[in-house]
Structures are given as structure tokens and as C-alpha cells.
Image (spheres, rainbow, N blue to C red):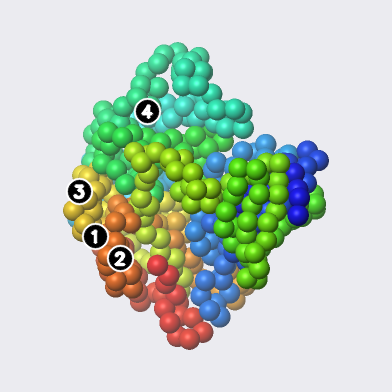
Amino acid sequence: MNTDVVIVGGGHNGLTAACYLAKAGLKVTVLERLSTFGGAAVSEQTFEGVEAKLSRYSYLVSLLPKKIIEDLELDIKLAPRRYSSYTPQPGTNKGLLVDNQDKVATATSFESIGTTKDAEAWHEFYRKTTLLAQALFPTVLDPLPTRSEAKAKLRELSGSYQIWEDFIEQPVGKIIEESFESDLVRGVVLTDGLIGTFGSNLDPNLDVNKCFLYHVIGNETGDWNIPIGGMGQVTDSLYKTAKNLGVTLLADCEVTGIDEDGAVQYKQEKREQTVHGQFVLANVSPTELEKLTGVEGIVPEATKMDGAQVKVNLLLKRLPKLKDEALDPVAAFGGTFHINETYSQLQTAFEQASKGEIPNPLPCEIYCHSLTDPSILSKELQGQGVQTLTVFALHTPHKLLEGKDQDQMREKLKQAVLASLNSVLAENIEDLLMTDINGEPCIEV
């Protein structure tokens, strides 16, 4: 079989590329190893017999440019979250609630945790990241700018090179330390650099900076919005558009090799097949691309990174009660709920994990999709007050699992996550878990 373009991997990036190329009049074939398309951007009924479609892997949208939605006429609706975050102060019944719609209430919350200066510092810090976003995000659909071009654009907007120096040239932890006095506030800000990234607070490799940038530049605001209907709606819309544009979409195709001449070998239903393309696009990891091409060095050894997080999906009978009795759980869980993520706790967790230990307490953050978008639940579950929770645990590098019994480690990590959650709640989270059709608790690690 011959085609203009072969795309290896049917994740959201592969589908997006397929749509644009097909719109340009090219014949496109997409090969996907799984039986469904979308990669990590999918929704699934995770718990047997329970009508709740969870965004099992990726879960929020920020880095999808509005222009792509418009160009491809995608049926994607995104909902903002009123609350930015809530962070309990360890050892107390107080916490920091950042309300995007109430600056006075936010300032009062800063004062309640013992810092008045950090309220204004917060707004000034994110004024700077907004300028960073306005300089960098418009370039994501253009050829990659040079370092000097990006730096010049930021200077044009901000009037100096200082923001570039603070966020690009030095560990981002340094500007965080200089900007804020509270250990808790510093930690909340730093977490944007640690989702999936294993690094110290003052990471000399600047991997934390890269992760931080991804989290603050999206659509020039850094806002992370909820896809109505779940992440699967994003993929479904891309898939339908690709199909309508005439893209050949082949599932259950395991690619086994890519040749320099554009020949791509794959297995489908145990049959070896080959498709030839003038161009081959790889919607796979650089490491996987090395295996498929037999070309070493695509990923320099110094830049290889381990995954560094645990994700836990839960389905609850209702939202849990907080130790902070004055705060409505709807507000606390309406944004990102940070747990044991003060600046000092994050550094300690990094040091513990570097020694091969599961951090104690385990830094975690929670997101509740169903509060903003209950459509992912059946009408029956909505009526019962059921809620979804997604938990990310930080500083859990893959090397913690090496040479260990995987099931035992999964259980240990689950217990560490639950212990961390329970440390800030007025009741045990386990008592609120729904059960599936087999009577098993609705929790997935």
C-alpha cells in the first residue's frame, strides 16, 4: 500500500497532524497499536458496572491552541474553574484558598495562613508569567523560534530581560524563593514544575523550568480548563474530523519498523504488512522511535527522563469533609487541591525518593472533574451526589519500581496516597468509595 504520509501513533497529536495534512489534499494513513485512538486523551468506564466515564490519563486542556479548534471545526467545549487552588496548612485546620473571582477573599485567605505580603506577590508573580505566555504561546504553531528571537519578544512585551533571566536561565525555584515568604505558598507555585518531572527545588538541569513553562503559557493565560464530556470528547472530535477528511485510520496495528525510504512495517491480526509513504510522522516517544528506526542517539543520554508520578482515580459517594470546617468542600475541590506540598516538603520528598524511598508524607494534588462537568456521570449517579477524584502523587520516579514486585509496589503507593489524603480530611476517604458491580472499591492506581 502506498500513501503520501504515514503517521505512526494515533494519539491526539497524530490525529491533529492527520487532519491538517488531509485538509491540504494529501493521502494520510494513521497506524494505531491499540483498538481505540487518542492515546492518553481518552475517557473510559473505568469501574465495571458503574456509569462514570473518567479521563483516565490526561485530564485538563491548556496547550491546545484555539486556532486548531477553529481550523478543524472541532466540537470541543472547555469550561474554566472558578477556584485556582486550595492548600491545607500542615498541622492546622487552616488552608489557602485562591479564588479567581474574588481578590479580597483570596487576600483574606493569605492572611489566615500568616502572610499578607504573599497575596500581592502572587499577583505580581503571575503577571510576569502572563507576559511570558504572551511572548511564547503564539509561537507554538510557527517554526521554533531561536533563543534570541524568543528573548527579544519577551523584552518587547516586558521592557527588560529580567523575566527571561528569572524563568529561563536559572532554576525557577530561585525566583519563587525571592518572590514569596511562605513555605506553603512557595510549594503551591513550584508544583507546576513537578507534574511528571523529578527534580529538586533548585534543579540545576532546569527540567523543572521546562515543566513549569508548559503549565503557565497555555493560550497566553496558563489556564487549565475542563473538557466537557471528558478528554475522550477531544479525541472523538479529532477522530470524526479525520475520518470525514478521508484519513485512513487503522487500529490494532503494531508498528515493528520504519525504514529510511518511508516503508513502515506493522502487524495487524498477526499478519505482517507494509505501507510506503513519502513522509513518515512519528507520534511516539523519542525512545520508541529509536527502537523502530534502529537509529541510536535520537534522545541524547543526558536528556532522558524517568516518569515521576502516580495517578489514582477514585469514585466517591460524595465529597469528603475537611478539617477546615469553615470551608465548603465544593470550593476546596473546585480547583487543584494541594496536599503536603509545601516547599520544604517537596524538597524532602525529592531527597527521600532519590534514596529509593516512597516519600512520607507523599506530596499529592487532587482534581474533581464532575464538580464542573457532571455529564461524565449517569443521571442516576448525579442524583446520588457521586463525585470523581483524580489524584497525582509527585516525586515517585520509575526507579522506585525497578526490581520490585509491581503489585506490591502498586499497593504501597496506593496506601501512601490514601494516607496523604486522609491527613487533611475530617474522615477517611476509604469510607466514601463507591463499589463496582463486583463489590470492589472504585479506586484505580
- Counting from the top left corner in percent of width and height, residue 85 is at 40, 48
Check disc 4 and report its element: helix, strand or loop: helix
In the rendering, which numbered label is found on residue 77?
none
Q: Residue at x 62, y 59 (%)?
A: 266
- Counting from the top left corner in percent of width and height, residue 119 is at 34, 34
Q: Quadrant for residue 272, please give it.
A: bottom right
Q: Residues within 10 Å of mark 3 (few under 14, many from 20)?
A: some
**Of callouts 1 and 4, which one flags the residue occurring earlier in the amino acid sequence?**
4
Q: Nearer the viewer, residue 153 or 293?
A: 293
Q: Which residue is mark 2?
A: 413
Q: Amino acid at mark 3?
A: Glu
Q: Quadrant of the N terminus?
A: bottom right
In the rendering, which numbered label is found on residue 167?
4
Give the alpha-carbon distance from disc 4 to disc 2, as whole Å: 32 Å
Above/below status of 425 relative to 177: below
Q: Nearer the viewer, residue 368 or 264?
A: 264
In contact (CB < 8 Å): disc 2 and disc 1: yes
In contact (CB < 8 Å): disc 3 and disc 2: no
Q: Which residue is mark 3?
A: 351
Relative to residue 380, is residue 350 drawn left or right? left
Give the alpha-carbon distance from disc 3 to disc 2, as whole Å: 17 Å
Q: Nearer the viewer, mark 1 or mark 4?
A: 1
In the rendering, which numbered label is found on residue 358?
1
Q: Amino acid at mark 1?
A: Ile
